């Protein structure tokens, strides 16, 4: 299932309105699509925020103010010999419920479109940065397979201390590291090699973010694997096979 097909079914999936093959297809797609997982998380967060808006009680004076306005209008209509019509309470409740539903629909639509655009843009930036590094003479600024050389090099250049591991014994030799600029921030990048494939692992600090299991996406022929651990967001990108990229993530 492609992302554009999943987008049309995610709302029904969250409302548990799907069954059979459609629900299984959406669930399988979400498991391997980083963008759609983020989209679902944002939809749930938006829905929760909107639901909480209605928990604040109305001011005690609101009812008396409404009655006063209605009484004033009734008097004016009586002077003009116009039949006064008062809306029944149940109609008010129905109108309020309809207005709340419209507000929720607009907010969810806005949240979906905003989240989808943000994820797409981030993926595009990371793939572009990866390709840009390969077009240069060297994709690294500090060339070393020694973690004790690469890790100190990042000190003062990024606002966190990255975990740096040489994985030569596992078939992923560390080439070195560099700085890049992604998602309007300076990020650290570790560069690994797997046979003839270069893997860029982008890292930046995400204070307060929960740990997140790896999610896979594909863009322009490149696999992207995103996860979060100990307040750090990671994005690994390469034209390497997805299974190999997942293996590297488990080693990091």
Image (cartoon, helix red, strand yellow):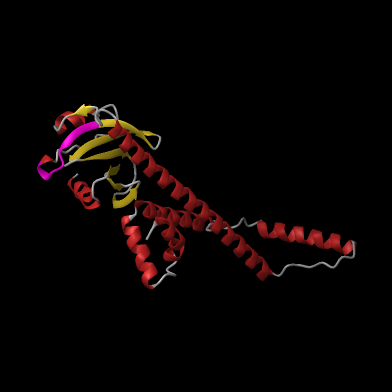
Q: Which image quarter is the N terminus in?
A: bottom left
> Which one is nearer the viewer's eye here, 200 or 93?
200
Dividing the picture into quarters, in which one does residue 132 lie? top left
Q: Is residue 163 visible?
A: no
Q: Is residue 226 left or right of residue 16?
A: left
Instruction: Give the extent of the magenta segment.
Output: 169-177
- Above or below for 241 versus 164: below
> Which one is nearer the viewer's eye here, 121 or 94?
121
- Above or below for 50 versus 198: below
- Residue sitting at x 39%, y 58%: 2
- Above or below for 136 versus 25: above
User: Residue lying furthest left in this view?
Assistant: 169
Dividing the picture into quarters, in which one does residue 140 lie? top left
Give yes or no for residue 183 being in the magenta stretch: no
- Across and down, in percent, residue 171 comes to 13, 43
User: Residue lying furthest bottom in this view?
Assistant: 20
- Residue sitting at x 46%, y 61%: 8
Give yes or no for residue 171 being in the magenta stretch: yes
> Which one is nearer the viewer's eye here, 130 or 91?
130
- Across and down, in percent, residue 131 comes to 32, 37
């Amino acid at each position: 299932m492609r992302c554009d097909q999943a987008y049309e079914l995610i709302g029904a999936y969250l409302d548990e309105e799907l069954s059979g093959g459609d629900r299984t297809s959406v669930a399988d797609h979400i498991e391997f699509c980083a963008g759609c997982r983020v989209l679902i998380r944002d939809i749930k967060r938006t829905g929760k925020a909107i639901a909480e808006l209605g928990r604040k009680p109305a001011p005690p004076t609101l009812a008396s103010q409404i009655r006063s306005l209605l009484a004033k209008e009734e008097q004016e209509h009586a002077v003009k010999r116009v039949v006064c019509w008062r809306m029944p309470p149940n109609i008010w409740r129905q109108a309020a419920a309809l207005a709340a539903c419209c507000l929720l629909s607009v907010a969810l639509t806005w949240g979906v479109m905003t989240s989808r655009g943000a994820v797409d843009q981030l993926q595009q930036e990371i793939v572009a940065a990866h390709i840009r590094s390969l077009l240069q003479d060297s994709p690294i600024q500090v060339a070393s397979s020694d973690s004790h050389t690469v890790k100190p090099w990042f000190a003062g250049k990024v606002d966190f201390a990255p975990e740096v591991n040489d994985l030569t014994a596992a078939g992923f030799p560390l080439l070195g590291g560099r700085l890049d600029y992604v998602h309007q921030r300076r990020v650290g990048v570790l560069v690994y090699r797997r046979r003839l494939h270069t893997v860029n692992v982008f890292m930046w600090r995400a204070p307060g973010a929960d740990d997140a299991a790896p999610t896979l996406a594909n863009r322009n022929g490149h696999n992207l694997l995103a996860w979060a651990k100990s307040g750090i967001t990671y994005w690994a990108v390469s034209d390497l096979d997805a299974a190999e990229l997942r293996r590297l993530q488990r080693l990091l």
